[in-house]
């Protein structure tokens, strides 16, 4: 079964405590991406990756890092989280820009 | 940053009504447009990927058209059902970058 798995699904943490949200896919997709969703703002792309070791900034990359050491994994790293990063995060994967994206179930982060 | 707009912001229709909504995007350097359906408490699911001017796609009672010269796409739902209630998102990519920009969505409520 085609899957995009995000962990954790929910996390409450404090300002400055480094955290990582993992994303794993089993579809051998080259394209992977992270979005955040905030009320009234829609989905905004944070970072994306076209392939292993190839990553690029989306529209709102500040405060985030990513890595793509393996094709199946694309973790999102918050080195020093702040309250304005409280949001719902989605990982998505796709076979290419002309292919639909498949979304994970989402991770709700609360930074106190 | 690519600007993608959707209208209306929200829509209430009666069961059985047909409805449509709009996604607007810059016509220059267009590459691809995606439509997604997003139900509450779930993750977005792909409906259509459209790339060519004049494209028409259909899936059951839902169809979409694309006009890249004037920069818009329409999504149509024929004979709306309560299970069609969701937020409908469009996402656009242009030739300048590999990132996708999502519109804010149209929230559809179908009343039984």
Image (cartoon, coloured by chain):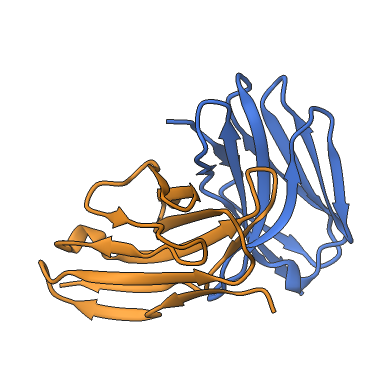
Chain colours: A orange, B blue
The image shows residue B95 at horizontal and vertical percentages of 58, 26
> Which residue occupies 56% across, 69% down?
B43
Furthest toward the left, the residue is: A16
A55 versus A112 height, above or below? above
Q: Quadrant location of residue B70? A: top right
- In the depicted view, which residue is nearer to us: B104 or A66? A66
Q: Quadrant location of residue A67? A: bottom left
Name the quarter where the N terminus of chain A is drawn: bottom right
Name the quarter where the C terminus of chain A is drawn: bottom left
Q: Quadrant location of residue A93? A: bottom right
> Which residue occupies 27% across, 63% down?
A77
- In the depicted view, which residue is nearer to us: B80 or A26? A26
Say how many tags the image has: 0
The image shows residue B74 at horizontal and vertical percentages of 75, 40
> Which residue occupies 68% across, 67% down?
B85
A50 versus B78 height, above or below? above
> Which residue occupies 84% across, 59% down?
B17
- In the depicted view, which residue is nearer to us: B56 or A57? A57
The image shows residue B52 at horizontal and vertical percentages of 79, 31
A95 versus B54 height, above or below? below
The image shows residue A47 at horizontal and vertical percentages of 39, 49
Please indicate whether residue B106 sits to the left or right of residue A105 in the image. right
């Amino acid at each position: 079964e085609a899957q995009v798995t995000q962990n954790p699904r929910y996390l409450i943490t404090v300002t400055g405590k480094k955290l990582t949200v993992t994303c794993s896919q089993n579809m051998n997709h080259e394209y992977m991406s992270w979005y955040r969703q905030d009320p009234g703002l829609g989905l905004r792309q944070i970072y994306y990756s076209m392939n292993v070791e190839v990553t690029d900034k989306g529209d709102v990359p500040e405060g985030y890092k990513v890595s793509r050491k393996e094709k199946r994994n694309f973790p999102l790293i918050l080195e020093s989280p702040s309250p304005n990063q409280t949001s719902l995060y989605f990982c998505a994967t796709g076979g290419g820009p002309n292919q639909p994206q498949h979304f994970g179930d989402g991770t709700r982060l609360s930074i106190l | 940053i690519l600007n993608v707009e959707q209208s209306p912001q929200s829509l209430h229709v009666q069961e059985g009504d047909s409805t449509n909504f709009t996604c607007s995007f810059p016509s220059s350097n267009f590459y691809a447009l995606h439509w997604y359906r997003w139900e509450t408490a779930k993750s977005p699911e792909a409906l259509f990927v459209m790339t060519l001017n004049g494209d028409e796609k259909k899936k059951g009672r839902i169809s979409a058209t694309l006009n890249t010269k004037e920069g818009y796409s329409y999504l149509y739902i024929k004979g709306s059902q309560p299970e069609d209630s969701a937020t409908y998102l469009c996402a656009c990519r242009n030739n300048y970058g590999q990132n996708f920009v999502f519109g804010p969505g149209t929230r559809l409520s179908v009343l039984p």
